Amino acid sequence: MGLLTRYPTELVREPGRFVQQLQPRLEIKDIRRRFGGREVVQGVSLQVMPGEVTCLLGPSGCGKSTTLRIIAGVDEQNSGEIYVDGELVCDTIYRVPPEGRSIGLMFQDFALFPHLSVADNVSFGLQGSRAAKRDRVAELLGKVDLLQSLEMYPHQLSGGEQQRVALARALAPRPSIMLMDEPFSGLDERLKDEIRDATLDVLKAEGTAVLLVTHEPDEAMRMADQIALMRDGKIVQKGAPYNIYNAPVDKAAAAFFSDINVIRGTVQGALSETAFGPFLAPGVPDGAEVDIVVRPQHLRIDFDRGGRGPHPTPQDGTPARAVVERARFMGRESLVEFRMEFDGSMLKATVPSVFLPKSGTALWLMLRRERCFVFPVQD
């Protein structure tokens, strides 16, 4: 059965023909929530498509978990609407109860029943005959590689195994949507990647639409088809991981995904002069300040410079001289901190493998223009 016949669609008329479009499995429109006079969720709108993983990403306290609880039906919005497969499930007057929304839930506390076996935990709440329940439990435990543990109890399992049981239990009723709130935060760091990949494989195989809340950019980049970056109760940027990372909406968005270097400059004639030459700042008035942002991995150490090497390409711009302040080996790379001779500012560069120059060593730095972002300084 093809994708467009398995999932809800709507017909959109184009001149002379009809075109089928995939309908969002979950859609929230202009959700707002206030606590004690403070609006903690401010006009959040989002779509999650069938079989897609969307990450609601942001720092603690930005409103991610509140948004998730509203979608699940365990909290109420002050305004806004929620739709599942195009059907209204909740506004400020009409409310489908949580158990009627075809939504599965997974939280950082796995909340397994300690007195029930693995099989009984997974089958808890399932409807149908005993044989149908047994078959569904066996199917899911097979997918999470725990079929051999069905008679065991939660305390006999590792944290990663408990997480997989919780996933199987949440998927057992075949929910259309899975809401996941920091589900991997309690796991050992060495296990996280393995468990996340296994979880993603199972969710994709089930065709479930997933909304995952996390404060970890690496987790969002690893798991998400789409990322919604949230800050102070608002979604500030939405898009595919590649686009969010490589085209941040502002300096804070760039800094959320990695360390950054910030070069401050003043604009004159739509240009900002720096140690690396002038940077274009179109639309910024004369006298205003801009922040030129570059990640440490995009700052290059040029060992042939000092007037002896070849001329830089236009993409590299002007080489700038800097003095090593300190260097540290980080395992897969070395982190070198420099003080710029141009203005005394500090910049960081990461170098693959081992590179540990002595403090006081003078080197030339270059950066590629297409890897830099220019943002007006916000008051």
Image (spheres, rainbow, N blue to C red):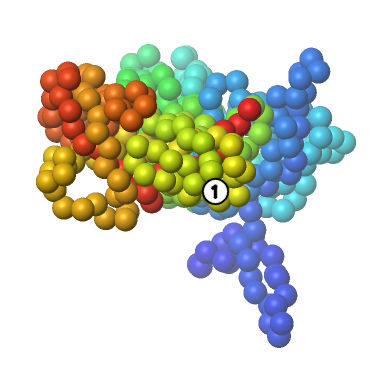
Q: Which residue shows up at 25% across the image and 29% down it? A: 322
Up/down of 77 relative to 285, above or below: above
Where is the C terminus found, in terms of image quarters? top right
Residue 196 x, y percent position in the rendering: 37, 35
Would you identify the image quadrant in which residue 377 lies?
Answer: top right
Residue at the image position 79 percent from the left and 39 percent from the top: 80
Residue 38 seen = yes
Give the total number of marks visible in the rendering: 1
The residue carrying mark 1 is: 269
Work out whether residue 18 or residue 268 is closer to the camera in this orientation and state it: 268
Drawn side of residue 300 relative to residue 61, left or right: left
**Residue 38 sits in which quadrant?**
top right
User: Which is nearer the eye, 140 or 275?
Assistant: 275
Q: Is residue 65 left or right of residue 350?
A: right
Q: Is residue 180 visible?
A: no
Percent x, y of residue 181: 53, 28
Locate residue 156, reporting x and y percent. 33, 16
Residue 208 point in image, percent of width and height: 52, 47
In terms of depth relative to the viewer, which is nearer, 177 or 132? 177
Classify residue 319 as left or right of residue 168.
Answer: left
CA neighbours of label 1 inside 10 A, class few (<14), some (14 to 19), many (20+): few
Looking at the rendered structure, the secondary structure element under dot 1 is loop
Residue at the (54%, 48%) spot, across then down: 269
Question: Please, is residue 371 above or below residue 115 in the view?
Answer: below
Q: Amino acid at mark 1?
A: Gly
